[in-house]
Structures are given as structure tokens and as C-alpha cells.
Amino acid sequence: MRFILSFLFIASCFTGIQAQGIEFFHGTWEEALAEAKKQDKILFVDAYAKWCGPCKRMAAQVFPLKEVGDVYNENFINLKLDCEKADGMTFRKKYPVQAFPTLYFLDPNGEIVHRTKGGRQADGLIALANEAMSKYDSSADYAVEYEKGNREPELVMNYVKALNKSGKPSLKVANDYIRSQKDMSTPENLKFILEATSEADSKIFDMLIKNKSAITALVGKEVVDKQIEKACNKTLAKAIEFESTDLFNEAKDKYSKNLPSKSEKFATNANLDYYKACKDCKNYLKSITTYVKKEAKNDASKLNKAAMDIAGTFNDDPKAMKIAEKYASKAATNGGLSKYYLSYAHILLKNGKKSEALGAAEKALEKAEGGPNEKSAAEQLINKIKQG
């Protein structure tokens, strides 16, 4: 699902400015925790020190990234704490911080959901967010009341919201509520339809589209579009899990009809994920060609990833490996980095081009600047080629 990762999130807007990174809470950690409880969100705490190198790199290079901000702003209350100052010292009395940075994820009651030490790049920080969210599930609290027969709209809304956050099925609860209502056009029920739209292949999705104008008037176009996008991605994920062509086409069709301005990119990346999962080499190669032509173009990082994805999935197909070699060569030439030449060397070796692979591996060693691991990887491949 890595090709559609960027489709899972849409930028948040505030006071007319589009967020480009993590928006950090301004206040004490106790105030931040209270806000997390109010919004039923996890509190993310970056426990740092001013002199810490990894802390400064994350603050300058990772936290400002849009893809990171999209994830953290939507799902967490975010707080930075200098742990050598007053509020940070107070925090450390309850939550041990023995290395910098220490990254905490706390539930609204202040219990530790997840904790880790050390800096992270964007992918790693997003992975931490997903891990923390997978561990937090407040739906059980609402389930107890629901099973007792409580059908108050606020409780059902919170129950559905908690189920959706935890990735659990919510359609049965949502449909039962909708069947109990005589008028779904009230503001409260329109907002319920929005929250309950968790999948595109559902009647509730169709209700959202039918009432789109009214719901948009209540919450804004961005919020509605975001929910449509998430629902289509959920259906796409199901299509991939069950290798269902019907669900695959439905996800693309509903995305195209309701978010036409971005539908081409969605379809391109959806095709890649689906055909890769289904091991459909013919259609995957068509899709990757389209992806490179329209999106990757001359971007070395994207070309290298495309090459490695092909080689990782269809390495027994000569045609596929020839295309992988082409993209890897272009990535190495355009990017000039050791890691790109290393990828190129591996693919050349797989294609039986031993002498060319050795040349690419030696080029990777020559350009190695990423520390001992990068140099070691090149040296190991060179030895493998010479001994093989």
C-alpha cells in the first residue's frame, strides 16, 4: 500500500494557511492532555533537549514535512517539551526520559500507549504514528453502554467514531442507528452520516453523496472530500486483501465521480497496488509505465523505488526485469547516489550481467557517503560478484 500512502491524508487548513508540518500545542503538557481528552485523541510528546543533534534534525527536517503533519495533525494532539526546563522537568517526574529525543504517545488518561527513543525520518515517524494508533482503542468503553441498551445519539456517534479510529467495523452499529431515525436530515444526523462513511462500498456512502451539499454546508468541503477519499481507500484496501476486481473498480469509480480533480493519480497508484498484490505482471507493467511517465518522470528516488518494486515482485519475469534495469539505470544516472548504483548493480546481477553489475557496485562504493553501512553493502556485493 506504499504507493497510495500519500492518498490517505489531506492537508489541514487553519486561519487561511495550509499546514506544512506538525502543528504543536502551545501550553503545558497537562493542558495538552486535557485537550487530548476533550477531542478523544492520543497525545504525542516530543521530549527533547536543545543541545540534542537528532532532536534538532527532526525539528528542522522531519516535523515540517507535509506528509508528517497530515498524519499527526489529524490523529494527535502534539506537544514539544524541552525536558531541561520547568514543564519538561515536571513531565519527567512522571514519564522517564533517559535519552533524547524520547517520543511518547499517551492516551487521554495519561497512560502510555507507545514510547520510543531516538530520532526518526519521515517514514519512521509515520510508522510510529500508525503503531500508536493501532494500540489505542477506546471503543470498549462505549461498547459496554451500547450493549446495555444505551442508544443516545451522542453515545452512538462516539462509539462509531471510536470504532473507526481503531480500524474496527462500524457499519452494523451505524446502520442500526440510521434505521431507528425518522429524519436523517437534521444537522446531528448529517454529521453522523459523515462519520459513519467508513467504506465506499456501502449504502451509507451513497447517503453521504446524496446529502453532500447539506453536509458540506455544515462542516466544509475539505472535510467531506477527506472522508470520501478515506472511504475509497478503505474499499481499495479490501479489494487488495480479497483480490476483488469488483471492489477495485468500485473504489476507482466512486473516487473518479466524487473527486475528479485527483482521480487520475488515485487510479494510477491504485492500479500499482492492486496488480502487484494480485501478481498480475502484465497489468502491473502497464501501470508502472504510466506511473513513471506521468508522476516519477526523472525523479531518481521514485525511479529507484519503481525498479526495486518490480524486481522484488516479478524477478522471474524477463520482460519485467528488463524494465526494472532501465529504471534503475536512469535512477543511478539522474540521482548519482551510492544507493541507486547499488540497486542498479543488484538488478544487473539478477539479469546475468555480471561485469556491468561489478561496475555499478564499484561506482556505489566510490560514491558511498552514508556511513559504514552504505560502504559495507557495496563491498559485500562486490565480493559476492567476484566470488560468484
Image (cartoon, rainbow, N blue to C red):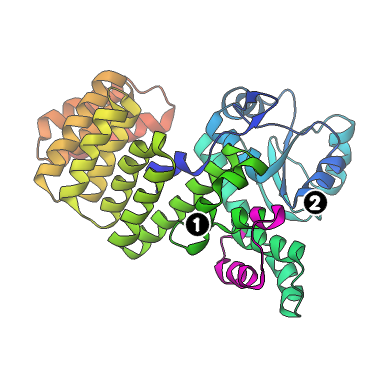
Q: Which mark is residue 37?
A: 2
Magenta stretch in the rendered image: 166-190
Task: Residue lying at the far bottom in this picture: please name it.
Answer: 148
Question: Residue 248: image x %, image y %?
Answer: 33, 56
- Name the element at disc 2: helix
Question: Residue 260: image x %, image y %?
Answer: 39, 38
In which quadrant of the rendered view does residue 301 lie?
top left
Residue 207 in the figure: left or right of residue 1: right
- Name the element at disc 1: helix
Residue occupying image coordinates x 75% and y 28%:
49
Residue pointed to by mark 1: 205
In which quadrant of the rendered view does residue 59 lie?
top right
Residue 68 in the figure: left or right of residue 334: right
Query: Cα distance, mark 1 to mark 2?
Result: 29 Å
Q: Nearer the viewer, mark 1 or mark 2?
A: 1
Residue occupying image coordinates x 29% and y 45%:
272
